[in-house]
Image: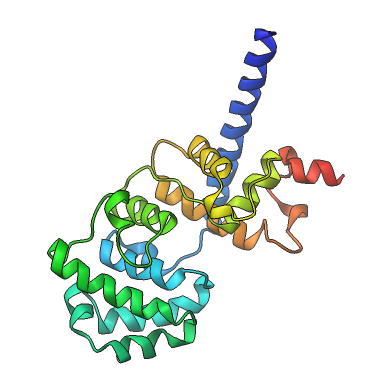
Amino acid sequence: MNLDFDVNKIQKINQKIKWFRRELLTWGEKHRRKFPWRNTTDAYAILVAEFMLQKTNASLVAPLYKKFMEQYPTVEALAKAEFIDIKNILQPLGLSFRAERLYKTAKILIEEYQAEIPDTEAELVKLPGVGKYTARSICANAFGQSKAVIDTNVARIFERFFGIEGGRVKSRCPILWRKAEEIAPENNVGIWNLTLFDFGAGVCTAKNPGCGDCVLRERCDYINREN
């Protein structure tokens, strides 16, 4: 075994990760999008946002989120609401089961958690409609925990930049989750996650990515392979 080769390889990978992180965070300082749920650490407000954002464009969620939070500002208010009213507000977002799961979650939070949002991933995933991604987003954004996340936008960035290939279902791919954990900074992981979301949504898009102006183009495997 060539130990020198292995050490050099690890050093190069670490250097690439540090560069990737630095460039993206710098980009994010100017380009991270401003949404109302990003201006709070209130766990309930973030939980509602995460439900509404599931498989939905954030720009479509923003006006409905504002209306929803004005009408149901607390877990208690949501749990006391008429289900049909919740369903009608969320109907423009699609996914008919979304309203039902959110309503059930509110009821469970009242009955089992004294209207408090759990602050652990293990407890959050027990709630209806809360998977690994949603739970970790809440942990990171509401409770300041170092929880990296993967969605299709984030997976696409990792696969292109680092030249890796995840599974067909990105949200369940161990390779991508390990990479997310490896790359995430030690602090402010919530901000890091948001930066990745926005970069994937606005620059490293599925179709016609903005490679020409991309801050990562110098070391991106995807661009170098295409050229």
Using residue 182 as the reference point, say whether residue 64 is left or right of it. left
Residue 35 in the image: x percent, y percent? 43, 68
Residue 107 in the image: x percent, y percent? 21, 73
44 or 218, nearer to the observer:
44
Using residue 184 as the reference point, say whether residue 76 is left or right of it. left
Q: From the image, which quarter does the N terminus lie in?
A: top right
Using residue 201 as the reference point, say whether residue 34 is left or right of it. left
Residue displayed at 68% across by 44% down: 165
Q: From the image, which quarter does the C terminus lie in?
A: top right
Residue displayed at 51% across by 35% down: 182
Using residue 38 as the reference point, say whether residue 214 is left or right of it. right
Q: Quadrant of residue 224?
A: top right
102 or 77, nearer to the observer:
102
Please say if 185 is above or below 213: above
Residue displayed at 58% across by 27% down: 14
216 or 68, nearer to the observer:
68
Colour convention: rainbow
Q: Residue furthest right?
A: 227
Q: Across the whole image, how many numbered discs are drawn on residues? A: 0
Residue 80 in the image: x percent, y percent? 18, 83
Residue displayed at 63% across by 49% down: 167
Please say if 24 is above or below 46: above
